[in-house]
């Protein structure tokens, strides 16, 4: 339910010129404009499920993207039935100047590479709601550090170093095959963000949130007397989300997707913090820049 101070569900990720939208609830466009973000560079949309509060903002978003002169393909990822659902919503948004590429999820877990960037992957994993619903894990892998001494010791010409450092395998005019592994050290820790909403706690959530730099999880109920209601409606409490965060050893937990009756989520966040200290009762518009760990710190 949209409220005067709270809109419906959506998450934006931005990486290297690419924008990824997860769910598109009512007023997503307004939230984006308040942040100063444009819908034009959205290349991927991921949908957790097809309840209205997660997809009702889509027709207007597509029209706005078209008006912003987007002409590159839009990839949509979601549970089985995605093309049918989007087609029905597009009755009121029939003309857009870009193609839509559909990826319908049929397996309990599926990994989809980000087009044009093998280092970035999107993993969808099934969760437990009263309709088919998926969570999403976003991984950015990081190659090892370039080792000039190793390259020199193997007689690799300097003119090939940059290409090898950027992951290219090549063959020299003499017929020698050069691979990145010949000049790169061990892979370094990358970044992971895990997002899940509209679900009971599941093993799949804990596994896919493992050591995430940021774990965004629904906290439908913060009050201490809502456990039975959470089980009945297939949602989660603050303390259940915090328990998952602790089990997965994440760095930070953002709670979201609150019940309309939960007017002031921050009043109850201390209950979750007793279980997992680094818990935040997130508000609309919250954002963060995730950076690679400092070299040698492991943090």
Image (cartoon, grey):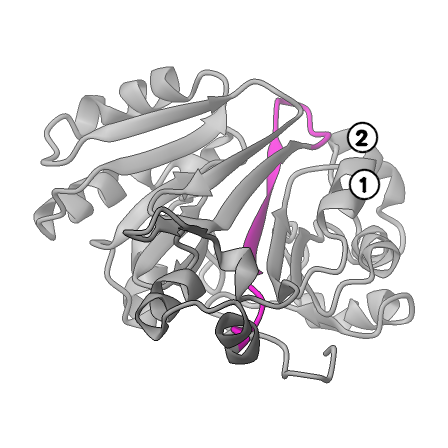
Indicate the position of residue 168 as horizontal and vertical percent values. Answer: 39, 54
Residue 39 image offset from top left, x and y in percent: 25, 54
Residue at numbered disc 1: 201
Q: Residue 287: where, in percent of width, then height?
A: 49, 71
Q: Say whether residue 223 is left or right of residue 169.
A: right
Magenta span includes 136: yes
Mark 2 and mark 1 lie on one chain; the one further toward the N terminus is: 1
Image position of 146 with respect to 83: above or below: below
The residue segment tinted magenta is: 127-147
Q: Residue 228: give x, y in percent of width and height.
A: 88, 38
Does the image show residue 186?
yes
Question: Which residue occupies the foreground of this view, 83 or 178?
Answer: 178
The crowd level at tag 1 (other Cα within 10 Å; few <14, some 14-19, many 20+) is many
Instruction: Give whichever of 26, 196 is nearer the camera.
Output: 196
Q: Which residue is mark 2?
A: 232
Q: Residue at x 61, y 50 (%)?
A: 195
Residue at the front extreme of this rendering = 174
Q: Is residue 243 left or right of residue 129?
A: right
């Amino acid at each position: 339910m949209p409220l005067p101070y709270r809109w419906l569900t959506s998450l934006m990720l931005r990486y290297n010129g690419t924008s990824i939208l997860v769910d598109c609830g009512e007023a997503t466009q307004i939230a984006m404009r308040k942040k100063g973000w444009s819908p034009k560079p959205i290349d991927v949309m991921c949908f957790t499920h097809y309840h209205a509060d997660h997809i009702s903002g889509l027709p207007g978003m597509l029209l706005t993207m078209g008006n912003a002169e987007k002409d590159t393909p839009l990839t949509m990822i979601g549970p089985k039935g995605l093309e049918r659902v989007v087609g029905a919503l597009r009755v009121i948004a029939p003309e857009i100047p870009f193609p839509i590429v559909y990826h319908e999820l049929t397996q309990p877990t599926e990994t989809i590479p980000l087009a044009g960037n093998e280092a970035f992957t999107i993993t969808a994993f099934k969760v437990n709601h009263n309709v088919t619903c998926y969570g999403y894990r976003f991984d950015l892998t990081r190659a090892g550090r370039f080792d000039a001494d190793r390259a020199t010791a193997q007689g690799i010409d300097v003119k090939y170093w940059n290409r090898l450092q950027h992951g290219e395998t090549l063959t020299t005019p003499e017929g020698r095959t050069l691979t990145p592994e010949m000049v790169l050290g061990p892979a370094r820790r990358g970044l992971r963000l895990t997002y899940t909403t509209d679900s009971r706690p599941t093993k799949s959530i804990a596994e896919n949130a493992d050591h995430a730099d940021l774990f965004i999880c629904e906290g439908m109920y913060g009050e201490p007397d809502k456990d039975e209601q959470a089980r009945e409606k297939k949602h989660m409490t603050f303390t259940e989300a915090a328990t998952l965060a602790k089990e997965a050893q994440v760095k930070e937990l953002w709670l979201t997707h609150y019940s309309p009756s939960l007017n002031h989520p921050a009043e109850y966040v201390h209950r979750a913090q007793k279980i997992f200290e680094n818990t935040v009762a997130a508000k609309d518009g919250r954002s963060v820049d995730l950076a690679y760990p400092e070299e040698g710190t492991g943090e």
